[in-house]
Image (cartoon, helix red, strand yellow):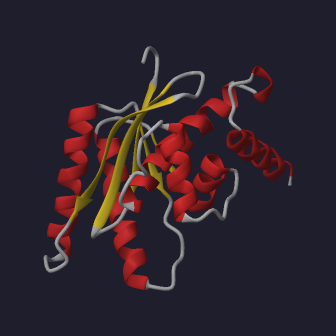
Amino acid sequence: MASALRVLGIDPGLTRCGVGVVDVARDRSATLVHVGVVRSVTELPIERRLAAIAAGIRSVLDEHRPDVVAVERVFAQQNRNTVMGTAQASGVALFLAAERGLPAATHTPSEVKAAITGYGAADKLQVQTMVARVLRLDALPQPADAADALALALCHAWRQGAATAPAAQGGLTPAQRAWADAEKAAARR
């Protein structure tokens, strides 16, 4: 895909860290490059688990050479251990991007859902379905961590393009238009 932006999306997690790489063209069409999950063994000490996550992300960075990295922004959850593991994996991902001189961005789950489905409270199945449609996949990306990583990558690419390609130029999906409109409304507040 000529002059495409290659984005690595990362859905951080200590046990399962979703990774997805997409190429997104100027017309916002997207192509799947890679999708997977980096895992760590729960019985290992935290430093070894983080090293396993780092090794998996490094492997994806080496093989697919993205232009930018998009990571899910950590948000408050009831389970403190889950939040800590997610925050630590997120920090590893952001560090690895910086180590390679790659720009990195974070996006909240609701931003990603709004960008992909047009609805910030969409459920996992809705996100997976839209990711499969956008990427023209025969099946829903599995597991949900992998689908979320792809959604993050798409969200980031579309968000970058939203600043330079107004909706009047066409090429936006209804979900992208809804997301852009919501961003404009939020900026006016």
**Where does the image place residue 165, in percent across and percent down from the top left?**
70, 25
Q: Of all residues shown, which one is farthest toward the front?
A: 138
**Where does the image place residue 60, in percent across and percent down from the top left?**
25, 42
Q: Residue at x 34, y 43 (%)?
A: 97
**Where does the image place residue 70, in percent across and percent down from the top left?**
45, 46
Q: Residue at x 46, y 22 (%)?
A: 4
The quadrant of the rendering that contains the N terminus is top left
Front residue of 104/133: it is 133
183 lies left or right of 38: right
165 lies left or right of 33: right
When the figure is inspected, residue 24 is found, relative to residue 177, above or below; the finding is: above
When the figure is inspected, residue 171 is found, relative to residue 18, above or below; the finding is: above
Q: Is residue 22 visible?
A: yes
Q: Residue at x 70, y 57 (%)?
A: 119
40 lies left or right of 81: left
49 lies left or right of 183: left
User: Would you identify the image quadrant in which residue 173 lies?
Assistant: top right
Q: Is residue 108 visible?
A: no
**Where does the image place residue 154, in percent across and percent down from the top left?**
52, 41
Instruction: Tell how many labels.
Output: 0
When the figure is inspected, residue 83 is found, relative to residue 142, above or below; the finding is: below
Front residue of 33/43: it is 33
User: Would you identify the image quadrant in which residue 14 lies?
Assistant: bottom left
Q: Residue at x 66, y 65 (%)?
A: 121
The quadrant of the rendering that contains the C terminus is bottom right
